[in-house]
Image (spheres, rainbow, N blue to C red):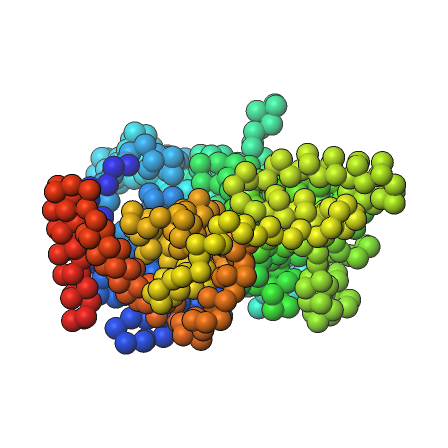
Amino acid sequence: MAIPQHTIDQILDRTDLVDLIGQRVKLKKTGRTYSGCCPFHQEKTPSFHVYRDKQYYHCFGCQANGNAIKFLMELDGRNFIDVMKDLSSQTGIELPKDNTDNKKLTYKKTQISPTEQPVTPSFQPDHDPFQFFESSEQDFIEPDLAPEGNLYDLLENVAQFYEQQLPQSQPAQRYFKKRGLNQTTIQTWRLGYAPEDWQHLERAFPSDIEGLKQVGLIRTSDSGRDFNLLRDRVIFPIRDVKGRVVGFGGRALNDEIKPKYINSPDSDIFHKNQLLYGLYEGTKNKAQDWLMVEGYMDVIALQQAGISGGVATLGTASNTDHLNLLFKRNHRITIAFDGDSAGQKAARRTLEIGLPLLTDGRELKFFILPQDHDPDSLIRQEGLERFGQLWQQAPLLSDFLFAHLTQHQNISTPEGKSQVMGELKNLTNLLPQHGSYRYLLTQSFREKLGLGRRFTPKVSNDASLSFNIRTRDEDFAIALLVSHPFLFREFEKLRAYISEEEMLGHLLSIFDQIFDQLPDDPEQAIYYSLGATAGYCQEIAEVLSRTNIFNLTQSPEHAFELAKDYALSLQKQYLQKKMKRPTSLKESMNLRQQFNELTKQISLRLVM
C-alpha cells in the first residue's frame, strides 16, 4: 500500500504524541517537555523526553528518537502499514484503499433463504395474486451482491459466543476452578467453552461459514463433511499486539483425549511464529520483566498472581521472532524450562537460536523449574515470594552455559577442559561478530577452567608519552566521551582537526570503530567503552577524577549541552592553531571561512 506523504503528515499532525506515549509510559511535565523512564531501555533516572509542539521524542540515554509512527513500530515490533492503519482509525483520516489487502481480510457471507417452503396462494377475489412474489422479491439478493464479512469482526463474535457458552458447562467451570482461577481472571482473559456438538458454529453463524473455513475453525473431512475444529474444550482467545482476537487455543477437559491442546491454524490474520500469548496483556499492563513459559495456563496464573510479563508460544517451539519481540521491550529476558531431559533439550535449542541475537547489552537468563513443577503449580504450592526468589536466582546465559557444557565432562583433566572449550567455540561462533560478548564469554570460561591468569590490559607506554599535556577542554571532552559514550557524535567532527598522536584523537578513533556496537543500556555502554580503551585506563581514571564528571553531569540533558559547548570550543582552538600554519593560500581562506561560521554558531549558543 502506497501512502502519500501528505496523508502521513496529516495523521501525524492530528496525533497527540504526549497522549499516545502516555498510554505506555508514565510522563511528567518538566518545563516545555514531558519526561519519563525510557521504554526502550532500563533506567532509574528519567532521560526520555516528549516534545508536544514538535511531535517528537528523544531519549538522552539510549538515543532512541522519532515520531508517533516510529514509536509504535519500535515498541510493538509492528510494520509501517499496520501502524498507519491504527493511527488512521484513531485520527479519522482515511488511507488509500488496497483491494488486495482488504480481500485477505474479508469473506463472502452466505445469504440465508427462508426456512418455510413457498406455498402457491389460492385465488380470492380480494387477493392480489402478485403480492406473494412482491414480498419475497425484497428479500432476494443476487449471489454476486451478497454482503462481505470481516475476519476480525467474525473472530470477535466467535470469542463472545464461546464466552457465553462457559456458564452452560459445569465441567468447564470446574476445570478453571480446579486450576485456581477467579472470576475476574476468567473475564480478563475472555476464557470460554466450545460445545461438544460437531456443527455448533454452523448453527450459531450460518451466514459466516466461508469465513470460519478461511480461519480454520470449520474443517472438511476426507468424506466431504464439515466439522468444527474445537469441540468440548475450554477456550483461550489469542490476541495480537493490538488486542484483536486472531485465533483460539482449545484444551481438552479429559486428559485422555489427544491432542490435549489444539490451536487455530495459521491464516491471513494469524501467524503463530510471530505472536506470543500474553504479549498484548503484558504490554497493556506496562510489564517490565518478561518471562517466557510453556503454556497458556502458566501465563494466566502469573498474571493473576501479579506478574504481568509472562508469555507463551502458540504450540510451537520458540524462534528468533519470539525472542526479538521480547528484546524490543527489555534488554534482559528469562525463559523457563522444566528440569527434566525434555526441558534440557528445549533449553539447548533456545540457546542456539538465541546466541545470534545477543548483541552487547542483551541478556538471556534460564529459569530451570524444580522437578514436577510448572510456573502455575509452583506459585500455587510455594507462593509468589518463593517463585520470585527462584526467578531472580535464575542464571545468566554464561553461567548456564558453563554448567551445561561441564555437566558430563571431567574438567580436572586437560582432555575435559579441551572438550569444553571446543564445544564453547562452536557456540560462540553463533554470536554476533561485532561486540565484546564473544571475547568476554571465552575469557570467563578460561578463568573458570583455570586456563592462565586473569586478563590484564596492556598499557602502551609509547602511546602514553604524548598524553601528558592537555588543555582543560580536552580533559572534559575525554571525561564526557567515556562517561556518556553516545555523545561521540558531538565530538566526531574533531577528528578532522586533531592528530591520533594526542589522547583525545586516539580515543575518538577508537570510538569511531566501536560506536555502532555500543549496548543500548547507558551503564553497559560505559563498561563497553572502558573495555575498549583499557590500554589507557590509568590516564582515563585520572581525568574522570580530576574533572569530577559524574557529579557535574547529573542529567543526560546537561551532559548533552556540555558536550556541544566543549566540542565547539575545541573546534575553535584547533582551527586557530591550523590558521597559524596554513599550507597554502587556498587552505588559509577555507580555514578563515570555517572559523567565521564556527564563531556564529558559538554566538548563537550564547544567546540561547
When the figure is inspected, residue 454 is found, relative to residue 426, above or below; the finding is below
Which residue is at 50% across, 61% downward? 539
Compared across the picture, whether 423 is left or right of 54 comes to right
Give x and y (percent) for residue 58. Answer: 34, 60
Work out whether residue 257 or residue 197 is closer to the camera in this orientation and state it. Answer: 257
What is the count of numbered marks? 0
Residue at 61% of width from left, 52% of height from top?
457
* Res 384 quadrant in image: bottom right
Residue at figure coordinates x 64%, y 39% from the top left: 428
| Nearer to the camera, 196 or 182 | 182
For this view, does 235 lie left or right of residue 479?
Answer: right
- 12 horizontally vs 217: left or right: left
Q: Position of residue 47 (x, y in %)?
A: 40, 67
Query: Looking at the picture, how far across and down is residue 371, in whole percent?
Result: 82, 55
Q: Quadrant of the C terminus?
A: bottom left
Q: Is residue 326 something that shows in the picture? A: no
